[in-house]
Amino acid sequence: MRAPLGIIVAAFAVAYGSNLAASTGPSHDWQRYREPSSGASINIPRDLFPFDLGPSLFGIGHLYSSADKSAFIAVYSVPTPTDKRNPVADLVRNMELRNGAVVTYRRASKRFFVASGFDGNSIFYDRCNFGGSSEKCVHIEYPKKDIRSWDKIVTRISLSLHG
């Protein structure tokens, strides 16, 4: 006796559902961007950030935005502090002074630091990799209402940061 198709589909969905969901999501036009003056490089979904806004507002780098200007990404480098300040504390202090931003996550290791949180209706994510005379960084902002759809995108961008 053959199992009904509904049972087979349900069993398949339970066994492979998470992988299927991840693979059927929208694909993006991922391109490698390299900041010529600092060597910082990152994978950027250019379909999400098609507009070149010129120099980054932070350090030496570049800024891109979404078509509707609701999301931004900056790839940049800043000099490594010589006075051994705590970069996470500096970032957190600066973010909390700006528009009442609140840092909800922070992590630091010997190789990098990450801080993220919200500022009004936007989520921000900052990562800087340590090494050499400069820190290679990425700053991403996107609408708070779209947090779930950005999670995997931000992770992929963050893990691609090199320089």
Image: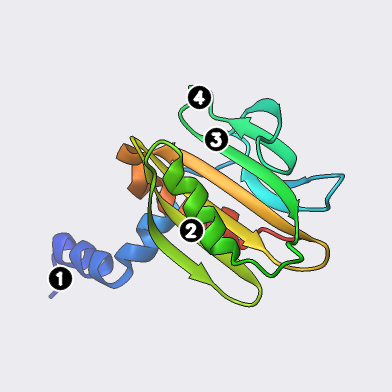
Do tag 3 and tag 4 residues touch (Cβ < 8 Å)? yes
Is 130 above or below relative to 51?
below
- Measuring 74% from the left and 52% from the top, which residue is drawn there? 78
**Residue with the mark numbered 3:** 72
Which residue, given by chain and number where applicable, does mark 2 sit on?
115
Q: Is residue 35 left or right of residue 23?
A: right
Q: Residue 117's spot in the image, x, y percent? A: 39, 51
Lower sequence index among marks 3 and 1: 1
Spatial CA distance of label 2 from label 4 is 22 Å
Identify the element where label 1 is drawn.
Answer: loop
Question: What's the amino acid at mark 1?
Answer: Ala
Observer-side mark, 3 or 1, equals 3
Q: Amino acid at mark 4?
A: Lys
Counting residues from the start of the chain, the first of labels 2 and 4 encountered is 4
Is the Cβ of the residue at disc 3 closer than 8 Å to that at disc 2?
Answer: no
Look at 15% across and 60% down and name the residue there: 6
Q: Callout 3 environment at 10 Å: few (<14), some (14 to 19), or many (20+)?
A: many
Quadrant of the frame with the C terminus: bottom right
Element type at mark 3: strand
Residue bearing the label numbered 1: 3
Element type at mark 4 = loop
Residue position marked by numbered label 4 in the rendering: 69
Q: Is residue 42 left or right of residue 127?
A: right
Q: Amino acid at mark 2?
A: Ala
